[in-house]
Amino acid sequence: MPKELEKLINAITYLPWIWEKSATKLAFFLLNSNQNFNENLSESIKNIKTKVSFCKNCFSLCDLWQDFCNICKDEDRDKQTIAVVEEYLDMMMIEESGIFKWNYHILGWAISPINWVFIWDLRFKELFERIQNADWKVEIILATNPNIEWEATSSYIIEEIEKRKLKYKTKITKLSRWLSSGYLEYADNITLVNALKERKEV
Ligand SMILES: [Zn+2]
């Protein structure tokens, strides 16, 4: 096998959800595909690291030249409600339901010492600053399915908010029921919408 082909197969194997057989198939697909397609693809792969940035308010993703994402810039959004999620994909799931016009805060992960993810690795400080600086009563929705990591993360958020002297008492809510799939990402739209609508105060 040519060295370059072998190198490509090896590189693709490192991608998640790809088995060796699929990696070989993909490499052959690229070998036989149009040169323009390959160049565009490699350009996009390169640019994903250099032209994508984080929103300075909620840590969602935005284009490099923007300070804030389109959600944070949207004046028609409900500024009083902040859904706290682990990652961008969770936010996308809620947005795709097309029902909620909330603001978000993306923590980046959940506390998980077993995976070497600690409090200081997540964007808590910025979340508490947002709550502290709000000139209105804020509802914080802990919008992730309960699991051990998220329980620890939620408890930390609740404790820290309670410790603070705030102008308005923060309302903290979480999903009323577990999603059978275990993750926001895999829940069907109706189940997710219901779980988010019927949230309960903690
Ligand atoms: Zn934002």
Image (tube, grey):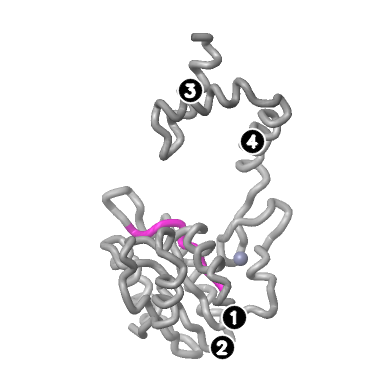
CA–CA distance in space, label 1 to label 4: 35 Å
Considering only vertical position in the picture, is 103 above or below 138?
Answer: above
Indicate the amino acid at tag 3.
Ile
Q: Position of residue 189 (x, y in %)?
A: 46, 68
Q: Tell me the residue that label 4 is attached to.
A: 46
Region in magenta: 103-111
Reading the chain from its start, which is encountered first: label 1 or label 2?
Answer: 1
| Callout in the foreground (1, 2) | 1
Label annotation for residue 136: 2
| Residue 135 sits in quarter | bottom right
Label annotation for residue 9: 3
| Callout in the foreground (4, 2) | 4
| Callout in the foreground (4, 3) | 3
| Nearer the observer, 24 or 141 | 24
Indicate the amino acid at tag 2.
Trp
- Do the residues bearing badges 1 and 2 touch, measured as CB atoms within 8 Å? yes
Classify residue 121 as left or right of residue 47.
Answer: left
Reading the chain from its start, which is encountered first: label 3 or label 2?
Answer: 3
CA–CA distance in space, label 3 to label 2: 54 Å
Q: Secondary structure at mark 3?
A: helix
Q: Position of residue 131 (x, y in %)?
A: 51, 78
Q: Secondary structure at mark 2?
A: loop
| Nearer the observer, 178 or 157 | 178
CA–CA distance in space, label 1 to label 2: 9 Å
Q: Tell me the residue that label 1 is attached to.
A: 79
